[in-house]
Amino acid sequence: MIGQLLVANRAITQDQLDRALQEQRRSGALLGDVLVSMKFVAEDSLAKALAQEARVPFVSLEGASPDSRAASLVPETLARRHSLVPVSRTATRVKVAQADPFDVIAIDDLQRLIETPVEVVCAPKGAIMRLMDRTYGPGSGGALGGGRLQSLADEGITALANPSEEFTTADSPVVRLIDVLIEDAVRAGATDIHLEPEERVVRVRHRIDGVLAHIDTIPRELQAAVVSRLKVMAGLDISEQRLPQEGRITQSVAGRPVDFRVSVFPTVFGEKVAIRVLEKEKLIRGLEELGFNRRNLGLFQDLLSRSRGIVLVTGPTGAGKTTTLYSALNVLGGRDKNIMTVEDPVEYEFPSIRQTQVRPRAGLTFATAIRSLLRQDPDVIMVGEIRDPETAQLAVRAALSGVLVFSTLHTQDSPGAVPRMMDMGVEPYLIASALAGVVAQRLVRLICQHCKAPTTYPPDMLAKVNLAPSDGVTFYKGQGCAQCDETGYHGRSGVFEILMIEPATFELIRERADSRRIKESAVRGGFKTLLEDALSKAVLGQTTLDEVVRVSYE
């Protein structure tokens, strides 16, 4: 195919093609590489012919500079294996230059890894390799850690061939590789690190601002060594590979101690590792930093001032409930209060608060812990989560005995917490007497201030938040830049709705009213919903309408 095209374009003769085909049958190499090695055709001419045949653009790459944003998406191992190099990246696609545009397997592999549309151009192989070295470093490197990850991975594979190699010493490649993984995740502001085994590689992903992003890959050959090292660091059983395990790591990063919660889970391709990054600065914030508007801040401070009752924080996983509770405990902490917690797990250790981790296998559940806590003369109790009827009833009993109880519950909104407690077998009159208030929350991504620009939305999108084009509201969106890694977002903020148990709500609970009636009554009393709070942040230009719709309907 390509040979006949070169002959038709008079780039080579028929005799040269025949000789090249003969050499190809002997060596098994690609015809294009054979033609170049026999000096029958120049790399530029070959690339132009391949681009013409594949119907993709041709680029020479002369004078091209590395694009770090594009390199952050394309793993070096894949780039070198398939002779392709990232050229540029926008908010919607990544452009790669390929020596063989007919290598669809390469593009399929890349597409599967990065989950971003790929645009292919064709370039001379030599130019691709030179740009690759400038992008990743000569013969090694990668986007993560300035190229350190792939370099250490190569060292690790070499070490595997030496049975006497020690993988636990501080200077071993596997130990240093894990240090790079952790350090770069913390510096990037990731809340979670995912090591996901696949058939040929281990994918590395970070959760940043609530969204998972592909970072790099680790050769599958290193999977066992990497997982074993993490198990040792977390105090887990390295011989157990069939059951899930959980542990904890404390490590110094950039001169400060950072805690990591490690979860190991068996899959068909081996053990997957999820690492939660637990930084004190992110878990404990001032109440003003959480995202409360003035009204909600006043209501929440009112709840914190109570001497008894239950304060529930509701929302899905990853909504920031733990951060809100920890920030509340930090406000309440002091010498004049006995504050105790029951958690699963303990994510941050307070010096002035007595904390307990549940251990169901040993018989220490939320319920059994609460029973014992009530004999410890507490002023404030924090229960990590109300999961079952026994825990719910004990939390109510504690509140009615004169203790301020904080806990979490999984409900869609704050009024929904009431029927949820009833479903757990708690009598309505007890809920009405014990419940002080319910805080429902979500997290919205904030618009990047470096690329923020006005935008418009179609009428159907506006209708979802009860607006019309005639309302004349100006919304904003991030266009994507280096500061936000082309996402248009940087950072997150909470959005809240707070249901206070007023006399009207008290009576509705005693009547076993459903969440709809409770909400309608609260709205008449000034209750502001999650949608209203999120929309106000969009109107102020803090977040996008897309985020408002997302959190309102999740």
Image (cartoon, grey):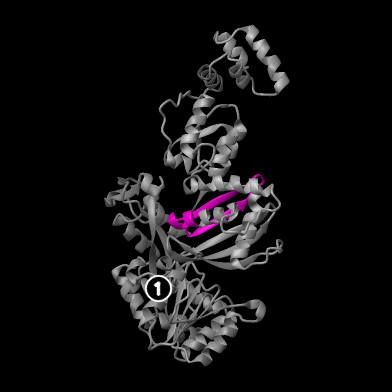
- Residue 365 seen from this side: yes
User: How many numbered dots are placed on residues in this image?
Assistant: 1
The residue lying toward the viewer, choosing from 226 and 8, is 226
* Residue at x 31%, y 48% (from the top left corner): 450
* Residue at x 66%, y 53% (from the top left corner): 165
Q: Which residues are magenta?
A: 183-210
Write down the quadrant of residue 41 in the picture. top right
* Residue at x 67%, y 11% (from the top left corner): 19
Write down the quadrant of residue 433 in the picture. bottom left
In the picture, the quarter occupied by the N terminus is top right
Residue 411 in percent (x, y) is at 50, 69
Residue 437 in percent (x, y) is at 41, 78
* Residue type for callout 1: Ser
Q: How dense is the environment of label 1, judged by Cα within 10 Å: few (below 14), some, or many (20 and up)?
A: many
The residue lying toward the viewer, choosing from 130 and 461, is 130
The residue lying toward the viewer, choosing from 297 and 507, is 297
Residue 190 in percent (x, y) is at 46, 57
Q: Is residue 134 left or right of residue 465?
A: right
Most distant residue in the left direction: 472
Whether residue 196 appears in magenta in the rendering, the answer is yes
The residue lying toward the viewer, choosing from 457 and 504, is 457
Disc 1 marks which residue? 327
Q: Is residue 222 left or right of residue 438?
A: right
Q: Is residue 246 above or below residue 425?
A: above
